[in-house]
Image (cartoon, rainbow, N blue to C red):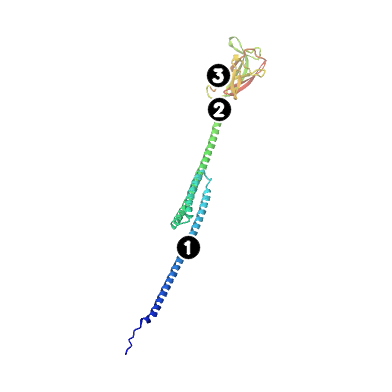
Amino acid sequence: MENNQQPSPANFRPERKKESNRLVYLLIILFLLGMNGYLLYMYLNTDKALETEQSNLLDVKKERANLEKLLANAKEELNTYRGINDSLNGVIDKKNSELYNMASEIQGLLNSKNLSKKDYERAMEMYDKFKYYYEKTKKELDEKLVELNEVKKENTELKASVKNLETDKDKLDGEKRKAISDLENAKILEAVNISASAIRIRSGGKEQETTKASKAEQLRISFGFARNAVAEHNRKDVYVKIFGPDGVAIKDDQSGSGTFKYAGQESIYTTKQSIDFTNNSEIISIYYKRAGDFKKGKYKFELYCEGYILGQGLLELK
């Protein structure tokens, strides 16, 4: 006879309890494993974030140092152009101001405590523009300097040309003055065949020469003009200056004495006469009639025309 006896409920309780405990342990283990995995994930991500942040901070510090160095170099290099030309000074001041404003804006972004990735990228973009603008500025200044040097060279050449022209002009002026001087000198008239005598007028108006002071009524001075092809053919005033035996120039207002210019000064003439110059050797006579008697002695006379002395002579009365 088979034994069909079933386990009683009391016999199942220990088994169920064991299974329940295993499940709890398993859940706890799974929970702990999950927590460890999460913590490990967070740790790794946090470490990576810290590395990224530290790297960004290092990049910012590096770029800020590069910017400051570039700005200092820019100012120093741009200032090397100062003083070369006055027109460059204003350009340099303007470029320095523009570069400084750009650098200040970049530094403002890089100095921000809460620097975002977007702001950093913007700062780096502006930094690249700053470098481009700086290089462009140097190129423009170099081109301007070349242009100024060309202008300076042209001005130097122009000044040399002007100086040469002035030298040539001075030379031509000198030659012209010399030619004029030579011509004026060539125009100076000269008296030839100069002679002098004392005369008295006889009946019928005939002149009779005498050497006696007591008989002399007039002094007659005769001469001719030397030929001169360049002198102007016109009337010439010839001044006669006669010195008495005492060596003093005779000034006789009753006989028409006066003054004339000679060597830039006023000079006394005893008598004068206007004569037509026709470039021939015709003998001309000029007379001086004294109001009183002539004294014994030597009489010196000089002839002047157009500011120059024509000639001179001597007459002695006894």
Type of amino acid under label 1: Leu
Q: Quadrant of residue 273?
A: top right
Q: CA distance from mark 2 to mark 1?
A: 106 Å
Residue on which disc 3 sits: 274
Type of amino acid under label 3: Ser
Type of amino acid under label 2: Glu
135 and 39: which is toward the camera:
39
What is the residue that sits farthest to the top in this orientation?
A: 203
Measured from the top left, where is residue 266 in percent x and y? 60, 22
Residue on which disc 2 sits: 184
97 and 180: which is toward the camera:
97
Decide: marks 3, 1 in contact (CB < 8 A)? no
Vertical order, 173 against 26 (above or below) = above
Q: Quadrant of the C terminus?
A: top right
Q: Sequence-wise, which precedes: disc 2 or disc 3?
A: 2
Vertical order, 169 against 144 (above or below) = above
Residue on which disc 1 sits: 50
> Residue, x 55% and y 27% (percent of image)?
184
Q: CA distance from mark 3 to mark 1?
A: 123 Å
What is the residue that sits farthest to the bottom in this orientation?
A: 1
Q: CA distance from mark 2 to mark 3?
A: 21 Å
Vertical order, 7 against 181 (above or below) = below
Measured from the top left, where is residue 147 in percent x and y? 48, 46
Q: Quadrant of the N terminus?
A: bottom left
